[in-house]
Amino acid sequence: MPLDPATAFSRCAGWHPRKKIGMLKKIFTRYAVLGFIVSALTPAIVYAGSSLAGGAGSTPALALGSLMAVLLGWIGAAASPLPASLFARLCPLLLPPLLLPLAYAAKALLDEPILVGLFWGIILILLGGIYSCFCLSFLFFSERISRSAAKARGAATLLGVALVCFGAAAWGHTTGLRDILDRNRGEASVGHGIDTWRYRPFSKDSELVKPAAAPSLRIDSGYPRLDGAVAAYPVYAAYAQALYVGLDEKTARQFVDCTNTVEAYKRLADGKIDIFFGAAPSAGQRAYAQSKGLSLTEIPVGKEAFVFFTHTDSPVRSLTREQIKGVYGGRIRNWKELGGPDEAILAFQRPEGSGSQTAMLIEVMQGQAMAKPLREERSHGMGDIVLGVAAYRNRKNALGYSFRWYATALFANPDIRLLAVDGVLPTPENIRNGTYPFTVSLLAVTARPLSPQCKKLLDWIRGSEGQNLLERVGYVPLRQLDGAGDDLYGY
């Protein structure tokens, strides 16, 4: 009687479904399942301690996790049976290598041009490394218990190799994270946040600039509530310290705050503050105010430059407006096209809604779409990986943008060079006379009818005393205005 094809193939190949199912059962014995559990729980256990030493993907995290996995493998070896087949014993170790191409394939689908694989690097190193250490430890101690010296030596060798390989991977991964994402190691950077406590009004350690002479205006009640961009905080906080009477460091906090451009504009529309200080609002911020039945009134209080910068070692000193639009529009991708070396341009952007990103869209791109920004991954808590716009890192092929005072005073760094635009440098004189192409206004923005105290404050800021203080801080003052008054501001 002829055999059916499946039976014939099984007999020729020595393959039988039941036998293979039995083999799979042996492979996924209790030690393999326990290994999965250990590898999943260990990162959570070591997270709190490792975050103090550089994050969940750091070398200390892997070292501690691996040691715990080895210990748990030793504890579990006496209680769990081992498969008889060497293949069945080692098959679970194939899982981490098999995850690698899948991880990078998934990452490629996100189309991220920078930091590819950092998130999956954490997963592979912690899951794969710790899991492998557990399995090999289990094998080693099981063979010791069964008195198989040769097999124990083999398992010990594999365990040592695994520890070295995953330790090297963790070191490389940590180095990559530090190079790109670390904010606190003194590397040249722009836009990673400042210690706002340095500019708290009425603080004994405050670094706020004081007026050259006693101001003519004093506000002792009905204090205007101020908030704004981080770059403008040292300016409006200096105004409050100079003019507000009867407050101390603690009580001033309810009237002078520093969130950021996005949050402060929202607070302005929600009626939680009276005046916003910073850059012009984005379309979304205007729309949010309109949804509240409000319109935003922009009052210039100073001048500023929107600047571009790169590493000091870059041979490029100047870019044209069209070249900048070409880079951030995605048409120019290599420094060679701009007179520089044959290197890819690492063009960083700022988050949507930030003052600098709004200025970029309005002043520079002028309605032209921007290329997809570089991305980074940041951990904000256990299991919380947030994907955001990559902030500027001062590599030799990097290009970034911000406001002049923000980049040169608040984040002064000798390794960053401001670029000329159309051959004009963003000097205070070129900002004052308007020859620098991207000269913008530092604004006071309101959303509701102003109280008498708010009007007095804005009059003073726009007058000679306020302009003098603004210049002492480092911004460029407005031209002297004749007959400045309510009609000029549109109150």
Image (cartoon, rainbow, N blue to C red):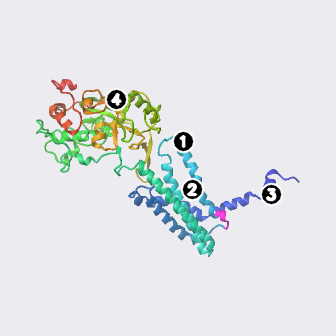
**What x and y, as percent, mark residue 234?**
24, 41
**What x and y, as percent, mark residue 223?**
18, 39
Q: What residue does disc 3 label? A: 11
Circle 3 or circle 4, nearest the eye: 4
Residue 28 appears in view: no
- N-terminal of the pair, mark 2 or mark 3, is 3
Q: CA distance from mark 1 to mark 2?
A: 20 Å
**Residue at image point 80% right, 54% down:** 7
Q: Nearer the viewer, residue 174 or 27?
A: 174
Q: CA distance from mark 1 to mark 4?
A: 41 Å
Q: How many marks?
A: 4
Over which residues does the magenta segment extend?
84-88
Q: What residue does disc 2 label? A: 96
Q: Which amino acid type is shown beneath numbered disc 4? A: Gly
Left or right placement of residue 432 versus residue 94 in this view: left
Q: What residue does disc 1 label? A: 109
Q: Which amino acid type is shown beneath numbered disc 2? A: Pro
Q: Nearer the viewer, residue 296 or 131?
A: 131
Task: Name which quarter of the figure residue 135 lies in.
Answer: bottom right
